[in-house]
C-alpha cells in the first residue's frame, strides 16, 4: 500500500489570484524548511481528494456528468455553482493545495538538491512534479477556459492577468514533452513512501506522461487536426498505458483522515443525499449492461434499477436506485487516468485516421477492460460488445465511443464531462427543475469579480462572456 502520511503543519500557499493575502505573507507557525518530497506528497493527495470528491461544497462533476443526482438541496444538480462556492473551491484547491506545493517542491529540488541521491533521480523527481503540474493546469483550463497562468502563484502579485486558454495548452504541451523526455527509466524518483501513485517507478511515470499527452492530443482534435495527429502518434509510440497495472491511481486508507472523500460524504456524514441518475441508469438498462450490479445497489429489488430524475425534486433512497456499497468503502481507490480511458483514446485516434490501428479492436479492449475492472468477466464483455447498440460501427464512431466511454468513466465525473463536451455524446438532458443545460464550463469564482475585477472583466470579454454556456477553446462543435 502506498501509505498516506498526513502532514499536520501548514504549508505556505497562496491563492492564484485575488484573495486577501495579508495573513499568509508571514507565517510564524510554519517551518522554514519543508522537504520537496513532503510537498509532493501533500500536493498528490490534495489533487486526488479534489478529483474524486462528491461533496456539493467542492466537486459536483459526478452530477455534471449526470451519473448521480440529489434527494435534497437540488440546486447543485441544477448547476448552481455559486450558492456553495463550488467553482471557488475547485479553483482555490487546485491553485493553493496542488500547484503551489508542486512549485515549491520544484524550487527546493533546483536550489537545494539532496546530495545523497544521484542527479538522474533528482531529474526524474522534477519531471514527475512537472507531469502533475501539467495535469492540474489542464484540469483548470478545461474547467474555466482562460485562467491566470504566467502571473499566477506569485505572492507579490494579487491581481494577475488571465492567459488565453489556447496559449496555456500550447505551453503545457511543451512542458509535458520536456518532462517525458527527461525521465530516465530505471533511475528512480520519489521514494515509495512519498510517491502515492507509482512508488517511484519512473517507467510508469513516463507512461502516465504519455497517456496524459494522448488525452490532450484528442482535446485538440476538432480544433487543430494536425497537432492532434502529431501528439497522438508521439504519445503512443513513446508508450502509453498497456494494462490496468499502469493506472494512475492512489490507494486510500480505512481510517480518517486518509479515507476516500466519497466515504466522508456517503457514510461519515450520516446523510442520504445521492441516488443514481436516470440518465445513466436508463442507458445501462437499455443495453443490459453487466456493470449495473457493480455500479449500483439493488435496493429496488434484485436486478431492478430505477434512476432518480436528474435535477428533479422528489428523489429518495426509497424510490430510486442508489450507488453500490463499494462507494461506502473508505479505501476505494482514486483514479486520474486509467487503461480503459487510454484504449478509448486510441480507438478515437484510429477512427479519426490519426494512427494506423484498428479502432474496433481498441474500442472493444476499452469496454472489456472497464467491465473486468468493475468486477465483471471477459465472457460478459464478449456478450455485451456484440449487441447491435454497442457493436462498433465506423460511421457511428463518435456516438459509440462517446456513449461507451461515458459509461466506463463512472466515478470520474470531470473526465466524463470533458469527453461529453468533445464528442457530444451521449445526449444529456437539461436539469429538470430549472431546465438548465449541462454547463460547457464553470464560471469564475465570485471573488475574482470583487478582488481581481479588471482582470476578470478582461478575461470574461476575451472568452465571450463569463457564462456556463461559453465553450472552452477545443469545444468547437
Image (cartoon, rainbow, N blue to C red):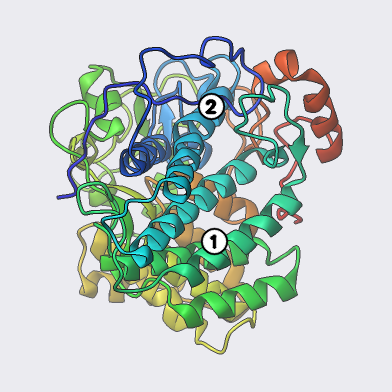
Q: Nearer the viewer, mark 2 or mark 1?
A: 2
Q: Quick one: SS at disc 1? A: helix
Q: Residue furthest bottom?
A: 356
Residue on which the image places disc 1: 402
- Work out whether 179 lies above or below 106: below
- Work out whether 213 lies above or below 78: below
Residue 292 percent coordinates (x, y):
29, 51
- Work out whether 417 lies above or below 390: above
Q: Residue at x 43, y 77 (%)?
A: 239
The answer to whether any part of residue 52 appears in the image is: yes
Q: Residue at x 32, y 27 (%)?
A: 319
Residue 159 percent coordinates (x, y):
73, 23
Q: Residue at x 16, y 38 (%)?
A: 253
Instruction: Check disc 2: other Cα within 10 Å, few if <14, some if 14-19, many if 20+.
Output: some
- Observer-nearest residue: 228 or 8? 8
- Please say if the residues under marks 2 and 1 sit with CB atoms less than 8 Å apart: no
Report the disc number at residue 115.
none
Left of 389 or right of it: where is 322? left
Left of 349 or right of it: where is 384? left
Residue on which the image places disc 2: 92
Residue 431 percent coordinates (x, y):
58, 31
Left of 392 or right of it: where is 157? right
Q: On the image, which quarter does residue 471 sit in?
A: top right
- Observer-nearest residue: 431 or 370? 370
Q: CA distance from mark 2 to mark 1?
A: 31 Å
Q: Residue furthest top?
A: 23
Q: Residue furthest front?
A: 115
Q: Quick one: SS at disc 2? A: helix
- Image quarter where the C terminus lies is bottom right
Q: On the image, which quarter does residue 440 sit in?
A: top right
The answer to whether any part of residue 318 appears in the image is: no
Amino acid at each position: 500500500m502506498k501509505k498516506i502520511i498526513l502532514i499536520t503543519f501548514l504549508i505556505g500557499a497562496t491563492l492564484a489570484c485575488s484573495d486577501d493575502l495579508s495573513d499568509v505573507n508571514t507565517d510564524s507557525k510554519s517551518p522554514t524548511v519543508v522537504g520537496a518530497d513532503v510537498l509532493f506528497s501533500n500536493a498528490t493527495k490534495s489533487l486526488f481528494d479534489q478529483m474524486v470528491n462528491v461533496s456539493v461544497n467542492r466537486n459536483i462533476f459526478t452530477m455534471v456528468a449526470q451519473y448521480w443526482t440529489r434527494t435534497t438541496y437540488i440546486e447543485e444538480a441544477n448547476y448552481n455553482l455559486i450558492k456553495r462556492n463550488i467553482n471557488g473551491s475547485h479553483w482555490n484547491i487546485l491553485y493553493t493545495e496542488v500547484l503551489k506545493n508542486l512549485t515549491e517542491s520544484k524550487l527546493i529540488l533546483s536550489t537545494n538538491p539532496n546530495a545523497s541521491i544521484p542527479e538522474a533521480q533528482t531529474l526524474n523527481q522534477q519531471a514527475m512534479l512537472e507531469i502533475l503540474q501539467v495535469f492540474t493546469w489542464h484540469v483548470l483550463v478545461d474547467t474555466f477556459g482562460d485562467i491566470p497562468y504566467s502571473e499566477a502563484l506569485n505572492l507579490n502579485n494579487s491581481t494577475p492577468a488571465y492567459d488565453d486558454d489556447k496559449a496555456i495548452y500550447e505551453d503545457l504541451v511543451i512542458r509535458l514533452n520536456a518532462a517525458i523526455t527527461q525521465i530516465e527509466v530505471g533511475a528512480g524518483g520519489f521514494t515509495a513512501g512519498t510517491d502515492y501513485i507509482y512508488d517511484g517507478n519512473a517507467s510508469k511515470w513516463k507512461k502516465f506522461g504519455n497517456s496524459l499527452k494522448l488525452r490532450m492530443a484528442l482535446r485538440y482534435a476538432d480544433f487543430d487536426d494536425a497537432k492532434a495527429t502529431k501528439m497522438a502518434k508521439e504519445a503512443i509510440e513513446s508508450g502509453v498505458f498497456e494494462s490496468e497495472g499502469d493506472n494512475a491511481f492512489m490507494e486510500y486508507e480505512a481510517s480518517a483522515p486518509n479515507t476516500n472523500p466519497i466515504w466522508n460524504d456517503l457514510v461519515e456524514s450520516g446523510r442520504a443525499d445521492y441516488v443514481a441518475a436516470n440518465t445513466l441508469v436508463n442507458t445501462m438498462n437499455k443495453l443490459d449492461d453487466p456493470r449495473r450490479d457493480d455500479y449500483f445497489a439493488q435496493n429496488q429489488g434484485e436486478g431492478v434499477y430505477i434512476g432518480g430524475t436528474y435535477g428533479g425534486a422528489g428523489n429518495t433512497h426509497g424510490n430510486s436506485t442508489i450507488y453500490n456499497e463499494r462507494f461506502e468503502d473508505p479505501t476505494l481507490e482514486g483514479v486520474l487516468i486509467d487503461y480503459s480511458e487510454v484504449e478509448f483514446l486510441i480507438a478515437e485516434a484510429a477512427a479519426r485516421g490519426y494512427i494506423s490501428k484498428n479502432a474496433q479492436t481498441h474500442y472493444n479492449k476499452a469496454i472489456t477492460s472497464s467491465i473486468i475492472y468493475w468486477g465483471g468477466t471477459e465472457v460478459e464483455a464478449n456478450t455485451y460488445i456484440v449487441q447491435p447498440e454497442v457493436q462498433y460501427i465506423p460511421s457511428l464512431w463518435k456516438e459509440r465511443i462517446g456513449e461507451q466511454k461515458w459509461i466506463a468513466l463512472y466515478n470520474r465525473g470531470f473526465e466524463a464531462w470533458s469527453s461529453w463536451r468533445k464528442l457530444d455524446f451521449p445526449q444529456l438532458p437539461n436539469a429538470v427543475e430549472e431546465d438548465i443545460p449541462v454547463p460547457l464550463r464553470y464560471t469564475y469564482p465570485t471573488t475574482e469579480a470583487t478582488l481581481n475585477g479588471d482582470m476578470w472583466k478582461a478575461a470574461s470579454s476575451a472568452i465571450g462572456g463569463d457564462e456556463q454556456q461559453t465553450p472552452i477553446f477545443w469545444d468547437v462543435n
